[in-house]
């Protein structure tokens, strides 16, 4: 399953570009100074818009396309290639769940099933309250502490059902655990 969340094609004549915010433009302009050409800034612009908007809508994709003078199809290709560019709205907290071989050997499937049961969602879905989106990732690079997941910017290791319950409650209480928990 491709964990990228994909919206409808931004090439539709019915879609109107939104205005990029001053902050988005400022950050994109800064990135343009770091790259040899505007094509190379496309991914960074997508990440900037996502940081400010939470995801990259068709209207945002079109706005970036026009601002950088890059074809929408090229930006869409970049957005759909990188599975951490979200093309549909995601929850307040994005849970990246490692389903690598190491995590699988250490029981990640049981942990994923527990998360799915606890939150009432599966991969690619968002909880009804908009708090959590669950996405698979091929590896989080912490195989010696499997199973692992990342919630927002925080890595959670040696997962058990009890640990997952505590992590979910911490995020619901707006008290995310520290990196390395």
Image: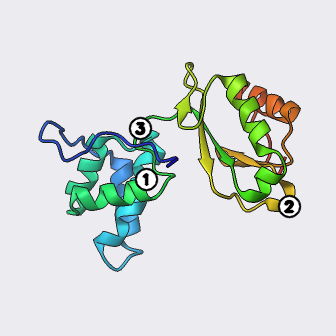
Q: Earlier in the sequence, mark 3 or mark 1?
A: 1
Give residue 88's mark. Answer: 3
Q: Which residue is mark 1?
A: 48
Give left or right: position of 77 versus 110. Answer: left
Q: Earlier in the sequence, mark 1 or mark 2?
A: 1
Q: Quadrant of residue 131?
A: top right
Residue 158 in view here: yes
Residue 114 location, x and y as percent?
Answer: 76, 30
Q: Which residue is mark 2?
A: 144
Q: For the residue labelled by badge 2, is the local secondary structure a helix, a strand or a loop?
A: helix
Q: CA distance from mark 3 to mark 2?
A: 33 Å
Q: CA distance from mark 3 to mark 1?
A: 16 Å
Give residue 160's mark. Answer: none
Residue 170 location, x and y as percent?
Answer: 77, 30
Give left or right: position of 118 versus 19. Answer: right
Residue visible at 34% across and 80% down in the picture: 36
Furthest-left residue in this view: 13
Residue visible at 73% across and 62% down in the picture: 141
Give left or right: position of 90 versus 111. Answer: left
Residue 27 in view here: no
Residue visible at 57% across and 32% down in the picture: 92
Instruction: In the rendered view, tell whether residue 32 sits above or below residue 51.
Output: below
Q: Quadrant of residue 30?
A: bottom left
Furthest-top residue in this view: 129
Give left or right: position of 129 versus 15. Answer: right
Instruction: In the rendered view, tell whether residue 42 sits above or below residue 9.
Output: below
Residue visible at 30% across and 76% down in the picture: 37
Residue 101 location, x and y as percent?
Answer: 74, 58
């Amino acid at each position: 399953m491709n964990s990228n969340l994909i919206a409808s094609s931004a090439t539709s004549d019915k879609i109107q570009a939104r205005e990029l915010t001053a902050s988005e433009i400022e950050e994109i302009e800064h990135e343009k100074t770091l790259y040899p050409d505007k094509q190379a800034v496309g991914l960074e612009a997508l990440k900037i818009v996502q940081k400010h908007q939470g995801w990259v809508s068709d209207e945002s994709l079109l706005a970036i396309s026009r601002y950088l003078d890059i074809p929408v199809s090229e930006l869409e290709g970049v957005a759909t290639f990188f599975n951490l560019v979200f093309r549909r709205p995601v929850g307040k907290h994005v849970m990246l769940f490692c389903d690598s071989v190491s995590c699988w050997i250490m029981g990640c499937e049981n942990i994923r099933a527990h998360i799915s049961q606890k939150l009432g969602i599966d991969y690619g879905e968002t909880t009804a309250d908009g708090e959590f989106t669950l996405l698979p990732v091929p590896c989080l690079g912490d195989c010696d502490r499997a199973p692992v997941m990342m919630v927002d910017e925080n890595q959670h290791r040696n997962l058990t059902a009890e640990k997952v319950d505590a992590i979910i409650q911490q995020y619901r209480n707006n008290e995310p655990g520290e990196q390395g928990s």
